[in-house]
Image (spheres, grey):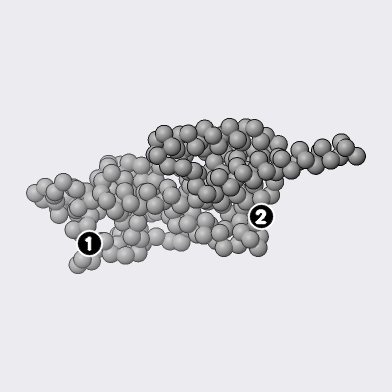
């Protein structure tokens, strides 16, 4: 549904985040005018609501605006049908995939792929700076998106899709340079394809950036990942020497 106007999109975003619940007028006014409401703020809010209803009439059919966006003594409530809000569908797919990942990794992988494909860019991109609640919701949604990416990569890593994982992780570590788990997964994938020197170099570079920028050492998980790769390489070298001696 196309909704023109930043303030109208802000109202819609707040209502969507509280779908099915009454949002007090005061809360909507605060989101629209975070530096303080102007004179006539209540009338301006009512005008935005009326325009949103017309937008919904155009999208869902005449009369649906008033049916879906109701008014009460306290404020306004937006009613959605199941599956209409991408963020809700994303969360359902992500959490279900997590629940079944061990029992059915193939189905979990498919669910996470569907969830990731719903993403269209930064959450609440145009309105996230309009208030603390919208900003917090955007940050939480993006955190869940990156968690879904990490879990999707992990399932593909466990299924042996190393070349695909390496290609995807090189892009993701550039996009999210502070997500240690992505670097851990990339180091493991490189090691499992015999690229141990590249894995060790990646670890050294990552550690240097963390120490220089944050004064922090890599986590125990990241240290274990690179140690596992190097130990595995040493074991392979030892086994090769034994075979040669025979």
Q: Is residue 136 left or right of residue 36?
A: right
| Tag of residue 24 | 1
Q: Nearer the viewer, mark 1 or mark 2?
A: 2
**Badge 2 local density, few (<14 within 10 Å), some, or many (20+)?**
some
Residue at left 50%, top 36%? 206
Residue at left 46%, top 52%? 144
Pick the front one: 157 or 53: 157
* Badge count: 2
Residue 111 occupies quadrant = bottom right
Residue occupying the far front of the picture: 245
Pick the front one: 142 or 59: 142
Residue occupying the far bottom of the picture: 73
Query: Residue 126: image x %, image y %?
Result: 32, 41
Residue at left 31%, top 45%? 128
Q: Label 2, on which residue?
A: 106
43 vs 185: above or below: below
At mark 2, the secondary structure is helix
Q: Are marks 1 and 2 in contact (CB under 8 Å)?
A: no
Query: Residue 143: image x %, image y %?
Result: 43, 49
Asked whether residue 237 appears in the rendered view, the answer is yes
Q: Earlier in the sequence, mark 1 or mark 2?
A: 1
Quadrant occupied by the C terminus: top right
Pick the front one: 234 or 22: 234
145 vs 71: above or below: above
Q: Is residue 96 left or right of residue 71?
A: right
At mark 1, the secondary structure is strand
Q: CA distance from mark 1 to mark 2?
A: 44 Å
Query: Residue 124: image x %, image y %?
Result: 36, 46
Q: Is residue 158 left or right of residue 169?
A: right
187 vs 76: above or below: above
**Badge 1 local density, few (<14 within 10 Å), some, or many (20+)?**
some
């Amino acid at each position: 549904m196309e909704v023109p106007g930043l303030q109208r999109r802000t109202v819609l975003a707040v209502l969507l985040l509280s779908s099915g619940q009454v949002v007090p007028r005061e809360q909507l006014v605060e989101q629209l005018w975070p530096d303080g409401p102007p004179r006539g703020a209540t009338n301006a809010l009512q005008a935005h609501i009326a325009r949103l209803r017309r937008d919904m009439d155009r999208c869902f059919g005449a009369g649906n605006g008033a049916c879906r966006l109701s008014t009460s003594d306290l404020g306004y409530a937006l009613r959605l049908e199941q599956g209409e809000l991408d963020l809700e569908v994303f969360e359902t797919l992500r959490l279900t995939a997590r629940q079944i990942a061990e029992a059915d990794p193939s189905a979990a992988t498919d669910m996470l792929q569907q969830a990731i494909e719903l993403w269209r860019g930064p959450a609440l991109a145009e309105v996230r700076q309009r208030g603390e609640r919208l900003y917090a919701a955007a940050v939480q949604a993006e955190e869940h998106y990156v968690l879904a990416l990490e879990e999707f990569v992990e399932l593909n890593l466990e299924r042996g899709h190393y070349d695909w994982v390496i290609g995807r992780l090189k892009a993701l570590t550039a996009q999210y340079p502070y997500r240690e788990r992505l670097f851990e997964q990339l180091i493991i994938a490189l090691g499992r394809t015999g690229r141990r020197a590249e894995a060790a170099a990646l670890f050294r570079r990552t550690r240097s950036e963390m120490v220089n920028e944050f004064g922090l050492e890599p986590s125990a998980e990241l240290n274990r990942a690179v140690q596992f790769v190097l130990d595995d390489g040493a074991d392979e070298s030892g086994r090769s020497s034994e075979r040669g001696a025979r």
